[in-house]
Image (tube, coloured by chain):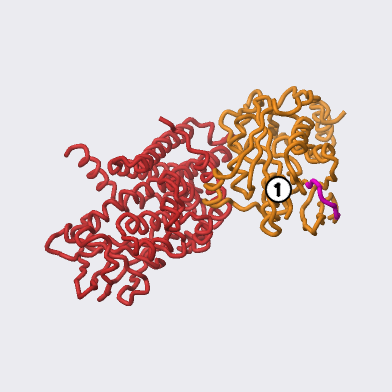
Amino acid sequence: MNFTLTEEQELIQANIREFAQKHLEPIAARLDEESRFPSEVIAQLAELGMMGMPYPREYGGGGTDFLTYTIVVEELCRACAATGFTVSCHTALASGPIFNYGNEAQKQKYLVPLCQGRQLGAFALTEPGAGTDVGAASTTAVRDGEDYVLNGTKTFISNGPNADTYVIFAKTDPSKGLKGMSAFIVSRDNPGLSVGEHFAKMGIRASQTSEIVLKDCRVPGADLLGREGDGFRIAMQTLNDGRIGVAAQAVGITQAALDESIRYSSSRIQFNKPLAVNQAIQWMIADMATELAAARFLTYHAAFLKDQGAAYTREASMAKLFAAEVANRHASKAVQIHGGYGYIKGQKVERLMRDAKITEIYEGTSEAQRMVIAGSLLR
Amino acid sequence: MPKIITCFKWVVDEADIRVEPASHRLNLERVGYKISDYDRTALEAAAQLKEKYGGTVTALTIGGPSAKKSIKDALSRGADQACFVSDPGFEGLEPAQVAGLLGSVIASRLEYDLILCGDGSSDRYSQQVGPRLAEKLGIPVVTAVVGLELESDRIIAERKLETNLEVVAVKLPALLTVLPDLNTPRIPGLRDTLDAAKKPVVTIAAAELPPVAAALIETVALQGLVLERNCVQFGADANAIRQLVETLRKSGAVG
């Protein structure tokens, strides 16, 4: 079992870490406070070739393995979870379905600009009445000649307000429940698509989240992904990959929490000594580092299995479940270590704790992950 | 179309070094390594010259086998090829030895118009290798370079001296040592990193070169400098001042 990264992976990791420290860390607090989309950073990441890493070069991608991409997400999230998540959502949730299920024409038209970072992607599955219960979706896609007409509302869509290309799930045959769902590629300039309510969130505030409203949205038949009825399968497979990105996001947040905790406890003096001499603090840091290592290995292992072509659904769920709970537990501990200062806006750990929470919720709640894991063991 | 050689060193990342609290010994157990900071500036300068004027860039380093990791890093920063002079005995060489080896390699195998080095390495910062190498090769050296322009067969270089900037012109071939003010090294993109593996690397063993000169310096100890504060407060009256002077005498701060 080889636990070392390749030379290329180490270099890419070091380069992205440097990029994040120089270009992302200094603006992360302001991005959060202003809920501002990190457009300048996304543009720089596109220049560096980081917006389509795990897809082949022939489609404008980086041609890397999934593990290398996962490491990049982690490093970005260590500096700014919202920015790292924007990259992850774009790469896995939007480009993923087009790469895995699109035909050549769709890949050339949509995947190439997404991978080059010239366009931003989004994934629209969730609805006001359909979160974990995907089957309760009510957005319909009615066949009309060669086209489909979509009607419905999607909610909590990350990259919603900024995306150029959306992968949208709608029922072509409501009578068939989950098997009646289909996936479509829809462009932002489609007159039937509009951005609805923008949401002000607890955390990852620089990531833009909104409703997407489809009103008599006419989509050419050529933009159906796969076949009618493939939608649910496409969504679930895509979320598998997205989950590894969320796990990486949680690992990045936890690493940042550890960095801040070590720094603060080494310099904060109480009773004439640094906090770090106290066993209570030492144990918090020991536990944080240990669970972080475990979360990281679970995450990297899931990515590794995907790269090997092995089954990885269970491992991706385990990684996301564990890493998310670790991030929440230890971001809270990090605030505790900082005492009163940890509660003040502008302190990084205050933002980390707010950012951590979403990792237990989106791309499948922790409860849903437990269902997936149990299902894979007990069936 | 200049032929450029950039010399670089693979060094310990000083941010990772821990100092043992009691003995002040350096704990290097978990250190990472990097291309020395000013050498990165040199590689970036070479890349920029190539972009502007064409030509080729050869990245050259001397080190033990562990320095092999540095090669792809250097190749991802604009070099066309790399030359790795490697031997386990090449860990921790002193500047005269390094300059001797670099001189042998360059004189016997490499064509060049310009050699670029960092002004000093992040670890020892002896600032000797550049000037010693130029002397070995019999070419002019310009140190502390913070600006440079290529004009057909000469370089106009700006040097940062203690109180002023000096502008010099030097005919090629020449060696320049650079300071970080010269440029901001770009962060290699994904393609640069992945394409590095495809570029040619020549590895030269110790046996292929004249023997390394004997070391002239013996490193007796390498210890961390730990600042200990006693935090004693003194008053300002005559007695307190006498106490202060006595304390300073006892500590050896004054004679």
B169 in the magenta segment? yes
Q: Is the magenta stretch mostly helix, strand or loop?
A: strand
**Residue B61, position in %: x, y?**
68, 37
Quarter of the figure that contains the C terminus of chain A: top left
Q: Mark 1 points at which residue?
A: B42
Q: How many marks?
A: 1
Looking at the image, which is closer to me, B232 or B222? B222
- Indicate left or right for B169 with B186 as reference: right
Of all chains in the rendering, the one displayed in orange is B
Judging from the image, what secondary structure is the residue with disc 1 in?
Answer: helix
**Residue A237, position in %: x, y?**
28, 51
Residue at position x 29%, y 46% in the image: A366
Q: Give the range drawn in magenta.
A: B168-176
**Residue A88, position in %: x, y?**
40, 54
Q: Which quarter of the picture shows residue A287?
A: top left
Quarter of the figure that contains the N terminus of chain A: top left
Residue at position x 66%, y 38% in the image: B83
